[in-house]
Image (cartoon, rainbow, N blue to C red):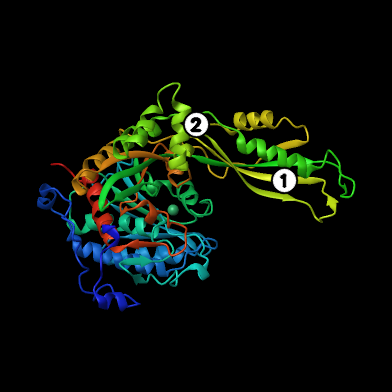
């Protein structure tokens, strides 16, 4: 794969503690530069310097261990504030809880702010934990190896956060005249619910981040055979609901089997729940996703994608598509995954209770009540009770795929990556965009780095890493998107 094939100078490869400033220029990609000429003539920051600086910020941020819990995001917030201040940008660090915090900065278009027009660049600084034994490098070293920067958060989402930071700083450095305010918010606690991060920011500091548009994580820029196939832009997301299925009955000696054994009742219930099929529902974002993806995939898959909207062929189409990619099924319906089982204290005792936990993911606009009622009906066992946990995140409405921000991405993508389509997406997992969409913000999720599906799959995984060539291209791509959206036209 071309994006991963970039080779670094041998000296840089050997250097464990990568000194960003003194390292020779990274090897140029052998691919032709994917820009139309008119981009070059615009005023802009010195892109190569911005990309190199961004690489340094990424490595520094990876080295700040923000594993959540406990988070320790305050250190990352202070680091980012330091980077901004060196660029002459005032940054405010706010402690949200001991050791935790957010950083906010703003580039002003004029004396009077117009929140409805402002663009927020949003990213989280916390990361998920690591299983150190499974890593080939120290996950918090930011080590460069085989043309990639390794480290927890390289993809989720210190890399994308640095792309936001670079776009923000790029605007300042270039002196581009702004048509709207641009706000940077780096927050924390995304990986554990958002209480000390986005919730804190929107509840207590909305006045500082009020905006009409936002760019966050959640999308993907898919590379295949060395070319960008499409830019996936997250415009909506599912919401998670945890439900416990509980079987109760009298406890007893295992030597005397009973029909009301809760373990047996629960097992039968879980089997029925696993087999339960929710109806297929096409929403604007998913309908457009499949329409735009259909011409990009092989003929057979494309045919099934087009059949999704044909009555009578829908079920077969979903079946075929699911065989290729189970995520497609999850985008088309509410889903239920049994994830935990709990029962018994001793092998020779029939327990009085057995529990299963279900992780349900609802499409935007769907309520948990009716789905749980249909599960109860499918299980049809009075010994089984369903208990729902309170929602960790609220349902949020989808963002429009006709907003000015979406259109700016649609204009920019084919200039940066000729031939690339822009495809709206619904993520099957939650992001901090939900809290913004609930405040009528047109929030969109991107990951600007051209990566293959295999490379993207390393998020949250062992040896998480980002190819440096993809990182550089992503930094430039995101700058172009943001500049296209915020630049004053006259
Ligand atoms: Zn993330």
Q: Position of residue 251 (x, y in %)?
A: 86, 46
Specify the label residue 239 is tagged with.
none
Q: Is residue 234 found left or right of 43 in the rendered image?
A: right
Mark-to-mark CA distance, 1 and 2: 28 Å
Picture quarter with the C terminus = top left
Please tell me which residue lies in front, 446 or 338: 338
Disc 1, SS? strand
What's the residue at 69%, 49% (across, down)?
341
What's the residue at 25%, 53% (across, down)?
226
Q: Is residue 438 visible?
A: no
Residue 266, quarter of picture: top right
How many marks the image carries: the answer is 2
Disc 2, SS? loop
Picture quarter with the N terminus = bottom left
Residue 5, quarter of picture: bottom left
Q: Position of residue 158 (x, y in %)?
A: 39, 60
Please tell me which residue lies in front, 216 or 140: 140
What's the residue at 68%, 28% (across, down)?
377
Where 462 sits versus 417, above or below? below
Residue 79, quarter of picture: bottom left
Specify the label residue 355 is tagged with.
1
Q: Position of residue 145 (x, y in %)?
A: 34, 70
Q: Is residue 270 found left or right of 69 in the rendered image?
A: right
In the image, the residue with mark 2 has its CB under 8 Å from the nearest atom of ligand 1? no
Q: Is residue 7 visible?
A: yes
**Mark 1: few/some/many CA within 10 Å (<14, 14-19, 20+):** many
Please tell me which residue lies in front, 117 or 67: 67
Q: Earlier in the sequence, mark 1 or mark 2?
A: 1
Where 68 sits versus 482, above or below? below
Q: Which residue is mark 2?
A: 365
Nearer the observer: mark 1 or 2; the answer is 1
Q: Position of residue 431 (x, y in %)?
A: 45, 47
């Amino acid at each position: 794969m071309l994006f991963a094939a970039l080779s670094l100078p041998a000296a840089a490869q050997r250097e464990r503690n990568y000194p960003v400033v003194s390292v020779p220029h990274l090897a140029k990609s052998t691919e032709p530069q994917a820009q139309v000429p008119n981009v070059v003539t615009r005023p802009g920051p010195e892109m190569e310097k911005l990309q190199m600086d961004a690489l340094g910020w990424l490595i520094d941020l990876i080295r700040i261990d923000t594993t959540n819990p406990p988070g320790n995001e305050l250190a990352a917030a202070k680091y980012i504030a330091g980077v901004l201040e060196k660029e002459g940008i005032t940054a405010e660090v706010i402690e949200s809880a001991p050791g935790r915090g957010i950083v906010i900065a703003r580039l002003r278009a004029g004396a009077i702010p117009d929140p409805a027009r402002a663009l927020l660049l949003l990213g989280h600084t916390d990361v998920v934990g690591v299983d150190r034994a499974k890593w080939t490098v120290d996950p918090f070293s930011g080590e460069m190896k085989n043309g990639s920067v390794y480290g927890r958060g390289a993809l989720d989402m210190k890399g994308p956060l640095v792309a936001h930071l670079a776009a923000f700083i790029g605007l300042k450095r270039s002196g581009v005249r702004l048509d709207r305010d641009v706000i940077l918010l780096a927050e924390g606690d995304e990986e554990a619910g958002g209480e000390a991060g986005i919730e804190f920011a929107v509840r207590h500091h909305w006045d500082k981040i009020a905006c009409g548009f936002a760019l966050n994580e959640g999308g993907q820029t898919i590379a295949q055979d060395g070319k960008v196939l499409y830019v996936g832009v997250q415009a909506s997301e599912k919401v998670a609901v945890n439900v416990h299925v509980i079987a109760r009955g009298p406890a007893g000696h295992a030597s005397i089997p009973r029909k009301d054994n809760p373990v047996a009742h629960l097992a039968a219930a879980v089997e029925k729940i696993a087999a339960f099929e929710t109806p297929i529902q096409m929403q604007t974002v998913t309908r457009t996703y499949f329409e735009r993806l259909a011409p990009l995939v092989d003929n057979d898959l494309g045919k099934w994608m087009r059949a999704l909207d044909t009555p009578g062929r829908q079920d077969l189409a979903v079946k075929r598509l699911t065989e290729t990619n189970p995520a497609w099924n999850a985008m088309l319906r509410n889903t239920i995954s049994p994830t935990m089982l709990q029962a018994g204290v001793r092998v020779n005792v029939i327990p009085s209770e057995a529990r299963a936990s279900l992780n349900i993911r609802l499409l935007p606009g769907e309520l948990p009540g009716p789905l749980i009622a249909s599960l109860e009906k499918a299980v049809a066992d009075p010994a089984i009770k369903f208990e729902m946990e309170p929602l960790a995140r609220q349902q949020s409405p989808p963002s429009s795929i006709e907003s000015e921000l979406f259109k700016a991405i649609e204009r920019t993508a084919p200039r940066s990556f000729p031939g690339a389509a822009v495809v709206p997406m619904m993520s099957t997992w939650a992001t901090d965009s939900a809290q913004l969409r609930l405040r009528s913000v047109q929030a969109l999720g991107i990951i600007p780095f051209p990566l293959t599906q295999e490379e993207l799959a390393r998020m949250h995984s062992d040896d998480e890493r980002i190819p440096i060539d993809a990182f550089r291209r992503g930094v430039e791509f995101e700058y172009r998107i943001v500049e296209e959206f915020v630049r004053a036209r006259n």
